[in-house]
Image (cartoon, helix red, strand yellow):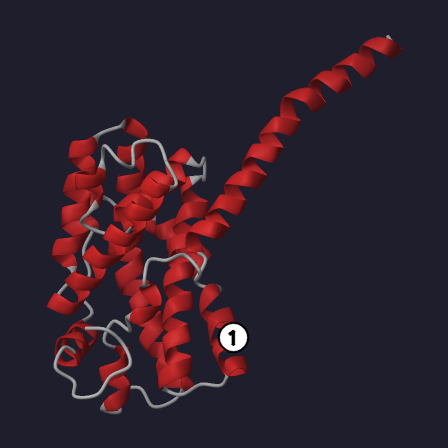
């Protein structure tokens, strides 16, 4: 009996250890996917923030927190993350029609030429990267991935075994990190104030993702009026640090 117990413990360890290692590797892949070092160009855009600061809509860290908090609750929760989830499921099902349709939906939801240009540029850069990394389906699906960054992000998440909730939290974190980095340059915020802001806002991401993942198709959609106005005016702003 004692020897049987030893065998059972060994068998359990042999079964579960590869699973643990696979999950650990998936988390490392997610870290790579959301790293600011990933060459997708996210750091070159401010999504209207630069104009908002220029004209005094955002003057300090409290106003910056309010601006980003609104975009998390309205934009990420009701648009980006629900569509990311549908793109993820489309990749799992190998449904390229759904992959293209939801990617086009997210692109169409971007309200300015600047935001649409950013979406296409980031999608192109990430798609090219995962093709160069020889990710399964990246090359043959290139035309389906070109509409928005969330499409190649979803494909990479699925093929690298990253669970959807973790992928969604990582996607939201990456957006937040880019926005806080822009705020540090523009407000300006000190590095410590920027980290404190990111810490506070990150606390809202898990609950937001949880809500976003159960939103129905008819509930998808968001409009951030001030961001859209700021982005459109940023396109012709005389001096700027960020791309238009």
Quadrant occupied by the N terminus: top right
Residue found at x 53% / y 46%:
28
Q: Position of residue 159 (x, y in %)?
A: 39, 34
* Res. 53 in view: yes
List the single residue furthest toward the front.
132
Tag 1's secondary structure? Answer: helix
**Residue 138 or residue 183, whichever sits in front:** 138
For the residue carrying disc 1, how many other residues have a C-alpha within 10 Å: few (<14), some (14-19), or many (20+)?
A: some
**Residue 9 or residue 208, whichever sits in front:** 9
The number of numbered badges drawn on the structure is 1
Q: Is residue 48 left or right of residue 171?
A: left
Q: Position of residue 110 (x, y in %)?
A: 16, 61
Residue found at x 21% / y 88%:
239
In the rendered image, which quarter is residue 156 located in? top left
Q: Is residue 191 left or right of residue 139?
A: right
- Residue beneath disc 1: 195
Residue found at x 30% / y 44%:
152
Q: Position of residue 90 (x, y in %)?
A: 26, 34
In the rendered image, which quarter is residue 227 located in? bottom left
Establish if 134 lies above or below 176.
above
Q: Is residue 59 left or right of residue 28?
A: left
Establish if 36 lies above or below 198.
above
Q: Position of residue 144 (x, y in %)?
A: 18, 39
């Amino acid at each position: 009996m004692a020897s049987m117990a030893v065998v059972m413990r060994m068998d359990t360890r042999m079964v579960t250890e590869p699973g643990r290692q696979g999950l650990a590797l998936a988390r490392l892949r997610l870290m790579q996917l959301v790293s600011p070092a990933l060459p997708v160009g996210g750091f070159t855009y401010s999504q209207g923030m630069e104009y908002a600061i220029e004209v005094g809509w955002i003057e300090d860290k409290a106003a910056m927190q309010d601006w980003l908090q609104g975009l998390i609750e309205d934009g990420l929760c009701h648009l980006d993350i629900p569509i990311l989830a549908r793109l993820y499921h489309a990749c799992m099902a190998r449904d390229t029609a759904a992959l293209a349709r939801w990617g086009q939906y997210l692109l169409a939801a971007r309200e300015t030429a600047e935001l649409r240009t950013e979406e296409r540029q980031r999608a192109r850069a990430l798609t090219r990267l995962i093709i160069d990394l020889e990710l399964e389906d990246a090359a043959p699906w290139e035309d389906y991935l070109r509409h928005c960054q969330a499409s190649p992000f979803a494909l990479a998440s699925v093929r690298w075994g990253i669970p959807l909730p973790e992928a969604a939290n990582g996607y939201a974190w990456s957006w937040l990190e880019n926005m806080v980095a822009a705020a540090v340059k523009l407000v300006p915020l000190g590095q410590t104030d920027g980290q404190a802001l990111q810490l506070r806002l990150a606390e809202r991401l898990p609950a937001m993702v949880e809500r976003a993942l159960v939103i129905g198709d008819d509930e998808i959609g968001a409009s951030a009026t001030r961001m859209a106005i700021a982005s459109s005016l940023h396109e012709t702003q005389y001096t700027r640090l960020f791309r238009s």
